[in-house]
């Protein structure tokens, strides 16, 4: 579960790139997050007993399907419950966030404060975190807002906002790259709903266990993203951030032309 929250799938990289994210940073963040997720998962939820999922304990079962068509039909029937569970959990989590934003907006209007939402609140909360990652203080509010948007809404909206910030030139290349690392993950409430719905449909008898560790895995996945951003900000100076990935893209273009 931590690995799922700390990484992104290859199918969505093209969308992030279209928003303005640097491809080299996205790939690097994904590679760094995979082993980091395993490490932090063991730290947050250490194994105190002998593992039951070792390679010598796994027994392969024979498929009950008699043919490829039979397997496809059974897979479709199984996927129906899986998809319905995902949709239900996704609607529930997104609706809950929208409800909280509505309540905050109403309370803010009573005291004359506009544009109060969980995203803006978390943006202010995450501003010191962005500064610790290596973002200059005058740019840390924007990066903190991106982290808050990714944590409360999803990474698609966060990368879209990142593209807007890059276009408006409110973020330097270094800050943009650190933000790319920090929000490169599926750690958000809607993904948590998808995770719970998916795993609960696969093993219904373990639903209570899944829900009990889901939030812990969500926090751990977020920490992994922040750690990769911190390491990136520590190891790369402004010049490297400006040029990182450009040589790779140029070589790819040259080879294509040849």
Image (cartoon, rainbow, N blue to C red):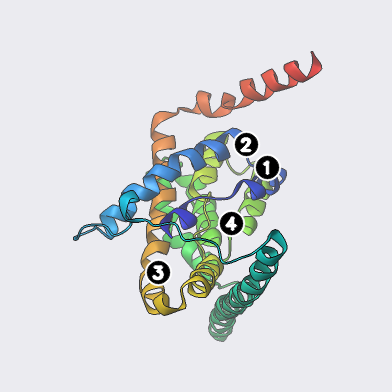
| Crowd band around label 4 with a 10 angstrom C-alpha radius: few (<14), some (14–19), many (20+) | many
Q: Residue at x 36, y 49 (%)?
A: 38
Does residue 178 show up?
no
Residues 258 and 130: in front is: 258
Does residue 96 appear in this view?
yes
N-term-proximal mark, 1 vs 2: 1
Q: Quadrant of residue 91?
A: bottom right
Question: Residue drawn 62% across and 49% down?
Answer: 162
- Left/right of residue 98 with respect to residue 143 in the rendered view: right
Q: Nearer the viewer, mark 3 or mark 4?
A: 3
The local secondary structure at tag 3 comes to: helix
Give how far apart the Cα atoms at labels 1 and 2 are.
Answer: 6 Å
Q: Which residue is mark 2?
A: 23
Mark 1 touches mark 2? (CB < 8 Å): yes
How far is disc 1 from disc 3 in space, using C-alphas? 29 Å
Q: Secondary structure at mark 4?
A: helix
Tell me the residue that label 3 is attached to.
215
Residue under label 1 = 17
Nearer-N-terminus badge (4/1): 1
In space, the residues marked 2 and 3 are separated at their CA atoms by 29 Å
Distance of label 3 from label 4 (alpha carbons): 18 Å
Residue lying farthest to the front in this orientation: 66
């Amino acid at each position: 579960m931590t690995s799922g929250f700390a990484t992104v799938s290859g199918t969505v990289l093209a969308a992030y790139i279209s928003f303005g994210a640097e491809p080299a940073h996205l790939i690097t963040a994904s590679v760094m997050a995979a082993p980091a997720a395993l490490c932090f998962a063991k730290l947050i939820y250490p194994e105190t007993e002998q593992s039951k999922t070792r390679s010598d304990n796994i027994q392969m079962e024979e498929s009950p399907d008699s043919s490829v068509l039979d397997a496809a039909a059974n897979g479709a029937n199984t996927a129906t419950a899986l998809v319905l569970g995902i949709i239900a959990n996704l609607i529930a989590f997104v609706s809950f966030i929208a409800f909280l934003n509505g309540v905050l907006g109403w309370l803010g209007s009573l005291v004359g404060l506009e544009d109060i939402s969980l995203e803006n609140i978390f943006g202010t909360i995450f501003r010191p975190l962005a500064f610790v990652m290596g973002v200059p203080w005058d740019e840390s509010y924007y990066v903190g807002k991106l982290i808050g948007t990714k944590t409360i809404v999803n990474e698609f909206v966060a990368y879209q906002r990142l593209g807007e910030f890059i276009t408006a030139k409110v973020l330097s290349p270094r800050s943009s790259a650190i933000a790319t690392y920090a929000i490169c993950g599926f750690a958000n409430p809607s993904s948590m709903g998808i995770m719970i719905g998916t795993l609960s449909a696969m093993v219904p008898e373990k639903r209570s266990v899944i829900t009990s560790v889901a939030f812990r895995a969500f926090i751990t996945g977020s920490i992994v993203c922040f750690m990769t951003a911190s390491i990136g900000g520590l190891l790369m100076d402004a010049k490297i951030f400006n040029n990182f990935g450009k040589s790779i893209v140029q070589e790819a273009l040259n080879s294509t032309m040849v």
